[in-house]
Amino acid sequence: MDESELRRLEASRAALLARFAEKMRATPSLADPAPKGEGPRNAHGMPRMPVQQGEQDELIPMDLGRVPAVAMDRWKLTVDGAVEAPVTLGFEDLLALPQEDRTADFHCVTGWSVLGLSWRGVPVSTLLALARPTAEATHAMFHSHDGYSTNLPLEEALKDDVLLVHALGGAPLTAELGGPARVITPQLYAYKGAKWVNRIELLTQDRRGYWEIRGYSNTAYPWRNDREW
Ligand SMILES: Nc1nc2c(c(=O)[nH]1)N[C@H]1C(S)=C(S)[C@@H](COP(=O)(O)O)O[C@H]1N2
Ligand SMILES: [Mo]
């Protein structure tokens, strides 16, 4: 990416974030007056451990019974749907975008959490800004190689800790944990973060993903014990 491309991308990202800023601030994980959980407040002012979660040292690989093998040199991610400029990135393109290092907690809806994981990757907001969502875009559907999908409203997808990550603890993300690249959603239950993601489809109305159809909450707020519908 050259300087002017970077500047254009930053401007597109800033405009998108500004459009959703108010909605982002008003989400329960940032604005709940009585969040349920325990421990000292985290960076967002929420209790460190959401209600009815137990701490684990490491992630437990969760999947639909199959770990897709996606070679790095064949990795591709398409951002399309309600966008002005559909785009497909290869792994080199992903690494050429501005990278972020983030420490984040991880909460699985089945009751376990891992605190303080070190991730490296690209904000989903950057990926969306590249494709420039239309004025009508309100949600995103994340599609994966294993047939998994999960949906997010843009006010969640644009949060600064929602990343497409390719490294954990300084090492490339393993296939079991979603490598070469997966999404993380630290402020929502982890089923909202698609492993082996290959497409982000922008939507003009909500549509439910794999677990959201099968009984898990569409909203997935950990500090509201929001697990099922
Ligand atoms: N593609 C895909 N992504 C997925 C899943 C899946 O089965 N397939 N499981 C989800 C669930 S329920 C959780 S808790 C996390 C688990 O991430 P982990 O395997 O790194 O622990 O991934 C989420 N993303
Ligand atoms: Mo999960």
Image (tube, rainbow, N blue to C red):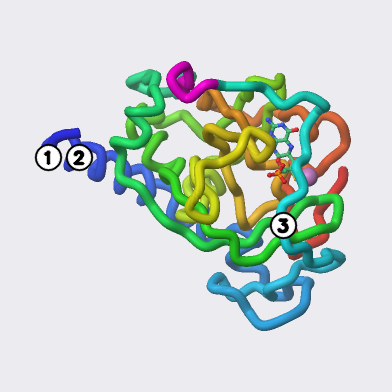
Residue pictured at 67% horizontal, 22% vertical: 68
Disc 2 element: helix
Q: Kindly check if marks 1 and 2 are in contact, taking CB atoms under 8 A apart as contact.
A: yes
Which amino acid type corresponds to the residue marked 3 in the rendered image? Glu
Q: What amino acid type should be assigned to the residue bearing mark 1?
A: Glu
Nearer to us of marks 2 and 3 is: 3
User: Foreground: 88 or 61?
Assistant: 61
Label 1 sits on a secondary structure element that is helix
* Tag 2: amino acid: Leu
Distance between the alpha carbons at the discs numbered 1 and 2? 5 Å
Is 64 in the magenta?
Answer: no
Residue 225, position in %: x, y?
82, 60
Tag of residue 62: none
Q: What is the residue that sits farthest to the bottom in this orientation?
A: 40
Mark earlier in primary sequence (1, 3): 1
Which residue is denoted by mark 3 in the rendering? 58
Q: Quadrant of the N terminus?
A: top left
Q: Nearer the viewer, mark 1 or mark 3?
A: 3
- Graded by Cα atoms within 10 Å as few (under 14), some (14 to 19) or many (20 or more), the crowding at tag 1 reads few
Determine the residue located farthest toward the front in the rendered image: 171
State the mark number for residue 3: 1
Q: Does the closest atom of ligand 1 sit within 8 Å of the Cβ of label 2?
A: no
Q: Position of residue 153 (x, y in %)?
A: 58, 40
Residue 72 belongs to the span the image colors magenta: yes
Badge 3 element: loop
The residue that label 2 is drawn on is: 6
The region drawn magenta spans: 71-78
For marks 2 and 3 on the same chain, the one whose residue lies earlier in the sequence: 2
